[in-house]
């Protein structure tokens, strides 16, 4: 589905067909191992699922893939699972295209992996009048200031849709404004759960404001990768 | 094979006893008690025996007398070895300490006797090992093993994996399971059942099994549970067990009392006044009374009212009344127990915590406020009165409304005629099995066939299918995770080629020891407003997790005097909507209330049928009352009340009974339609039936069907038309499909989420304590949500998922009897009839108003009942004209 004329929502990713740039965010590789460490013996399925979804997305033949923060989950250390899965994902992508790593709040020590793959980690990445950044803090930079569209992750937006007393949670994209710029908030690529309910839970990104969130447009990712335009948040019952 | 134990001759026992033991015994007791006359000799002769006797029936001494005797004989001959001769297991830590004291004392006294007579005796050691035992005491036990070991099911399971301790079990000769009735019906009992087989496997001789139980049924099954199965020549055989059922000897004086003469035409004030005056009168007339209420909050309420209304009797210088329930601290409960033993209290009010055999001294009256819901329970509770077996158990059931009156009256009849309701023993629980297999793998390396054979010796797992067994092995071996990460998830290794298995990982023993157990940890749930405008979480208050479990989306409940509609939960938070118009659908005490037993329900249904027949034969009032008088054990006041109740139901509507299921349709003042099922089958059956009917009716029509259930029936309500009759018809056409339908109906419910966590914790998929850190219940619940989603992706047949469904359908609900009811409908043994009413019939009053009970003060509920009752009487008199 096309949004803001130049970009398209492809599953959980954002696709710029002219530039052949693909953006994904918040993979949180290693989340399962972190749960295991806490004694929750959840089986590791995420890597396989993410790999499969990426392989499907690679069929678009992107030139550049931007990973918009939080490739891995653990703070402060790199777990065994993270190391092997992060390199696995990067290898898969690097075979096909250029990869740009944007620093997220969980990526404090991503450096070693990046170094091994000869990749730089940047705080943000701009092309045309678009700027891609993780969104956990407001960055002050002239390039960002001059851009017209910001693309962020970090929030893991999801929404619960109620029908009668039945309710289901879905991942979603948010499209709205920050100051005078257009703001696109991406859902998490990670598969263990949908995300945090934007109507109900605390907003995490400083780019989002509880008083203004109602005027954001919602794009819901339904089953079988169908995308539904739901209109403005404040109009959703 | 069960055989009735025989009453043995006193002389026989005298011959068998060592002179020292004999002398000691008769310095304390005049005679052998009945359980002793039945039980002592068979134990001497090393026969398995189940002794069922009322509380205070000297059961424990019966079991220990032969064992002490045997040990004294050995000690005299200096033949006592350094090993465990007897393992005694009780469900309560507190009971373990009681038993320890009660064993130490006779042993000490016998020793003194011997000293006086200059007889040399080896020292007989007794030790307690529970979760509270200090490390030092534990290591002492290894150096000098106790000859009699007193323990709990959980500590027992830990010992069974402790290498050094196992050696001391090489020739255990006796195993005693106390309070079997409190264990057999839950997963702790399932767990213990397998542990006992593990002990037998470790021991070179098969220990004599001694089971002690309060009144319980079916006693044959409990005997089988105690002894299990043996394989002979490749064929399974039930093992032999003697049964000594000494319940019939205890004399009972049981009555049901109504606090006022007319239970319906009354005011709240009269009711209250009547109730507490009656209680006070009973308490003052006796030395010590034990009062059972059905909920914890009622316990406190009763004490407060008594103190307020009779300050002189209960608020004198010293406290004469106290509360004892599971929400109170250990120290407080202990203090009350102590005061009871010292005879300092006139009355203690309790919910369930004093049901089990903790020594509470002499109680001469047991009062039950409201129905205790099962015949076995009424006997267990009233059995607390009249300490010795020869005393009379005096029990009074105080009834609070007309349903209660009928229920209690039939219950008393069954109790006096010793028709005990049957318990259900859970079988083939896969979560407990996983925990046990892990323990066994830690103990040693096993051959798979050898392991399965051992497991099938246990009554609870005798019917375990190979398929289920293998699925648990595959789970434990971490096969669900794929090859690369098997080492992370595998608790055991399992070699298909050699058929061998063993534990995996260095932490195994530590993980096992710190996470073992079957009782789920529960905690309070915070109630929070969902979708608040300012996103600031507003806390309303707290509810029990067990109560949350009962909530369905859309249910309305009352907290702190206000109504809330339940929407969803996350971890330990329940999100609600505060602006609800609908009346409450679920009373706040719902999760605490014990369910009515199926057998008792059917006995009440049978009574209804008998009365219905009399009305239909146009029998006179006098004749019907005469029948009630001959059938039930009641006074005139109660007979009148029951007659009037049935009279109104008969003339206003119809009397539902064992062969007539009445469906009553009516609309309330807001035009909401109700279909009331007069299905008096107990709440566990109604839970299953109501969910299945609502699920099917919802599938064919609108989804917003409200459900209300109690023991006497259930209702479905909605503003749109419901095809309930059609749903019931579909169900009864294929009773065996109920399981599948219910499995679908519970899939996304709160109870499923909670029970999945419990099962995942029992099967150690969630570790409560891991790498030195404990996890709060909230965290466990939150994370188990991810786990549930992940496990469902692996397979809908994942063993822990299947166990969750089984637990809900079989243990929480009663799918077996629910299916049976549907079959009876199909076979025409139960006919359904639909009637339409403007005002709900008298038999449905309690069901319709139960949700409101929290909101309306008791006054307005009684007012409401009175108003409805008046209307019904008017209708009847019009009809009669």
Image (cartoon, helix red, strand yellow):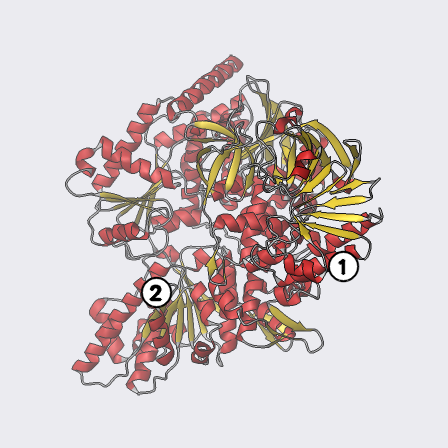
The image shows residue B824, relative to residue B769, as above or below, that is above
Q: Position of residue B161 (x, y in %)?
A: 49, 72
Could you say which is closer to the camera, residue B442 or residue B210?
A: B442
According to the picture, the residue beneath numbered tag 1 turns out to be A91
The image shows residue A230, relative to residue B52, as above or below, that is above
**Residue at screen point 49% across, 55% down:** B185
Q: Position of residue B416 (x, y in %)?
A: 39, 47
Residue B409 numbered tag: none
Instruction: Please report, as a chain letter, where disc 1 is located.
Output: A
Q: Position of residue B8 (x, y in %)?
A: 36, 70
**Residue at screen point 16% across, 43% down:** B318
According to the picture, the residue beneath numbered tag 2 turns out to be B60
Q: Is residue B40 visible?
A: no
Q: Quadrant of residue A222?
A: top right
- Check whether the beta carbons of the residues at disc 1 and disc 2 lie within 8 A of each other: no
Q: Position of residue A155 (x, y in %)?
A: 62, 40
Disc 1 to disc 2, how far (Cα)? Answer: 70 Å
Looking at the image, the residue that sits furthest to the left is B317
> Of helix, strand and loop, which one carries label 2?
helix
Could you say which is closer to the camera, residue B517 or residue B585?
A: B517
**Residue at screen point 62% across, 48% down:** A104
The answer to whether residue B671 is left or right of residue A20 is left
């Amino acid at each position: 589905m096309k949004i803001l004329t130049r970009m398209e929502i492809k599953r959980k990713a954002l696709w710029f067909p002219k530039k052949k740039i693909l953006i994904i965010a918040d993979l949180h590789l290693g989340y399962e191992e972190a749960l295991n460490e806490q004694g929750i013996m959840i089986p590791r399925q995420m890597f396989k699922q993410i790999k499969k979804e990426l392989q499907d997305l690679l069929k678009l033949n992107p030139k550049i893939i931007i990973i918009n923060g939080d490739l891995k989950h653990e703070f402060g250390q790199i777990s065994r699972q993270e190391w092997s899965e992060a390199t696995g994902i990067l290898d898969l992508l690097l075979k096909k295209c250029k990869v740009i790593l944007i620093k997220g709040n969980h990526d404090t020590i991503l450096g070693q992996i990046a170094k091994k793959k000869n990749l730089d980690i940047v705080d943000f990445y701009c092309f045309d009048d678009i700027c891609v950044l993780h969104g956990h803090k407001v960055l002050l930079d002239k390039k960002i200031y001059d851009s017209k569209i910001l693309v962020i992750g970090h929030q893991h937006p999801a929404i619960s849709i109620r029908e009668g007393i039945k309710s289901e949670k879905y991942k979603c994209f948010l499209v709205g404004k920050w100051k005078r710029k257009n703001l696109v908030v991406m859902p998490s690529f990670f598969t263990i759960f949908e995300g945090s309910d934007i109507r109900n839970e605390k907003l995490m990104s400083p780019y989002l404001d509880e008083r203004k969130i109602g005027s954001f447009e919602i794009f819901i990712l339904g089953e079988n990768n169908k995308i539904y335009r739901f209109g403005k948040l404040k109009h959703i019952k | 094979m069960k055989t009735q134990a025989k009453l043995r001759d006193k002389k026989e026992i005298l011959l068998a006893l060592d002179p020292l033991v004999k002398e000691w015994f008769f310095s304390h007791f005049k005679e052998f008690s009945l359980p002793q006359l039945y039980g002592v000799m068979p134990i001497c002769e090393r026969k398995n025996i189940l002794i069922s006797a009322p509380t205070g029936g000297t059961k424990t001494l019966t079991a220990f007398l032969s064992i002490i005797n045997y040990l004294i004989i050995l000690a005299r001959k200096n033949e006592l070895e350094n090993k465990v001769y007897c393992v005694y297991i009780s469900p309560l830590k507190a009971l373990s300490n009681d038993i320890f004291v009660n064993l130490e004392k006779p042993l000490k006294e016998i020793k003194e006797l011997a000293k006086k007579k200059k007889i040399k005796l080896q020292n007989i050691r007794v030790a307690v090992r529970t979760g509270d035992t200090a490390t030092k005491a534990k290591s002492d036990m290894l150096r000098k093993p106790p000859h009699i070991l007193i323990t709990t099911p959980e500590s027992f399971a830990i010992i069974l994996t402790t290498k050094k301790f196992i050696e001391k079990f090489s020739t255990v000769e006796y195993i005693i399971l106390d309070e079997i009735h409190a264990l057999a019906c839950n997963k702790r009992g399932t767990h213990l059942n397998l542990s006992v087989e593990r002990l037998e496997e470790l021991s070179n001789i098969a220990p004599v099994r001694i089971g002690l139980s309060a009144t319980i049924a079916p006693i044959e099954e409990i005997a089988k549970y105690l002894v299990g199965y043996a394989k002979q020549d490749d064929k399974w055989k039930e093992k032999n067990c003697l049964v000594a059922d000494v319940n019939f000897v205890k004399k009972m004086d049981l009555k049901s009392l109504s606090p006022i003469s007319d239970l319906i035409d009354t005011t709240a004030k009269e009711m209250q006044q009547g109730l507490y005056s009656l209680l006070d009168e009973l308490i003052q007339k006796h030395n010590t009374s034990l009062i059972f209420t059905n909920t914890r909050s009622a316990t406190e309420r009763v004490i407060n009212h008594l103190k307020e209304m009779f300050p002189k009797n209960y608020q004198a210088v010293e406290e004469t009344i106290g509360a004892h329930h599971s929400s109170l601290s250990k120290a407080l409960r202990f203090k009350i127990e102590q005061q009871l033993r010292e005879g300092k209290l006139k009355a203690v009010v309790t919910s369930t915590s004093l049901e089990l055999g903790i020594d509470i001294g002499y109680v001469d009256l047991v009062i039950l406020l409201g129905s205790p819901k099962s015949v076995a329970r009424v006997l267990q509770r009233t059995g607390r009165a009249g300490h010795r077996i020869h005393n009379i158990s005096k029990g009074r059931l105080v009834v609070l409304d007309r349903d209660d009156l009928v229920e209690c009256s039939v219950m008393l009849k069954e109790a006096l005629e010793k028709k005990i309701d049957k318990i259900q023993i859970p079988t083939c629980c896969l979560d407990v099995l996983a925990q046990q297999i892990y323990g066994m793998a830690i103990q040693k390396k096993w051959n798979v066939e050898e392991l399965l054979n051992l497991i099938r010796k246990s009554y609870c797992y005798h019917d375990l299918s190979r398929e289920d067994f293998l699925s648990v092995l595959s789970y434990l071996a971490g096969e669900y995770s794929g090859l690369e990460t098997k080492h992370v998830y595998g608790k055991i290794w399992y070699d298909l080629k050699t058929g061998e298995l063993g534990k995996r990982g260095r932490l195994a023993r530590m993980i096992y020891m710190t996470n073992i157990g079957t009782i789920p940890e529960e905690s309070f749930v915070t109630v929070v407003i969902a979708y608040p405008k300012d996103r600031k979480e507003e806390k309303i208050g707290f509810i029990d997790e067990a109560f949350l479990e009962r909530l369905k989306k859309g249910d309305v409940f009352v907290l702190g005097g206000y109504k809330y509609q339940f929407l969803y939960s996350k971890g330990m938070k329940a999100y609600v909507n505060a602006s609800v118009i609908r009346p409450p659908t679920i009373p706040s005490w719902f999760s605490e209330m014990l369910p009515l037993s199926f057998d008792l329900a059917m006995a009440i249904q049978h009574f209804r049928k008998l009365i219905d027949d009399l009305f239909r034969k146009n029998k006179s009032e006098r004749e019907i009352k005469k029948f009630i008088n001959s059938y039930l054990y009641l006074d005139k006041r109660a007979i009148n009340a029951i007659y009037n109740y049935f009279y109104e139901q008969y003339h206003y509507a119809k009397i539902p009974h064992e062969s007539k299921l009445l469906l009553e349709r009516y609309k309330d003042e807001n035009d909401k339609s109700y279909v009331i099922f007069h299905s008096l089958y107990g709440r566990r059956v109604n839970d299953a039936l109501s969910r299945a009917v609502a699920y099917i009716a919802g599938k064919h029509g609108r989804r917003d069907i409200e459900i209300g259930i109690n023991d006497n029936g259930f209702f479905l309500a909605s503003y749109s038309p419901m095809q309930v009759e059609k749903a019931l018809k579909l169900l009864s056409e294929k009773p065996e499909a109920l399981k599948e339908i219910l499995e679908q109906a519970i899939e996304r419910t709160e109870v499923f989420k909670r029970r999945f966590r419990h099962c995942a914790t029992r099967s150690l998929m969630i570790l409560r304590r891991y790498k030195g850190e404990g996890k709060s219940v909230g965290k466990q619940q939150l994370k188990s949500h991810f786990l549930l989603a992940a496990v469902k992706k692996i397979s809908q047949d994942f063993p822990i998922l299947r166990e969750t469904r089984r637990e809900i359908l079989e243990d929480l609900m009663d799918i077996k009897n629910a299916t049976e009811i549907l079959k009876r409908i199909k076979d025409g043994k139960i006919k359904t009839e639909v009637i339409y009413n403007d005002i709900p019939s008298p038999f449905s009053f309690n069901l319709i108003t139960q949700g409101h009970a929290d909101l309306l003060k008791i006054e307005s509920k009684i007012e409401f009942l009175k108003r409805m009752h008046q209307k019904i009487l008017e209708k009847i008199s019009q009809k009669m004209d």
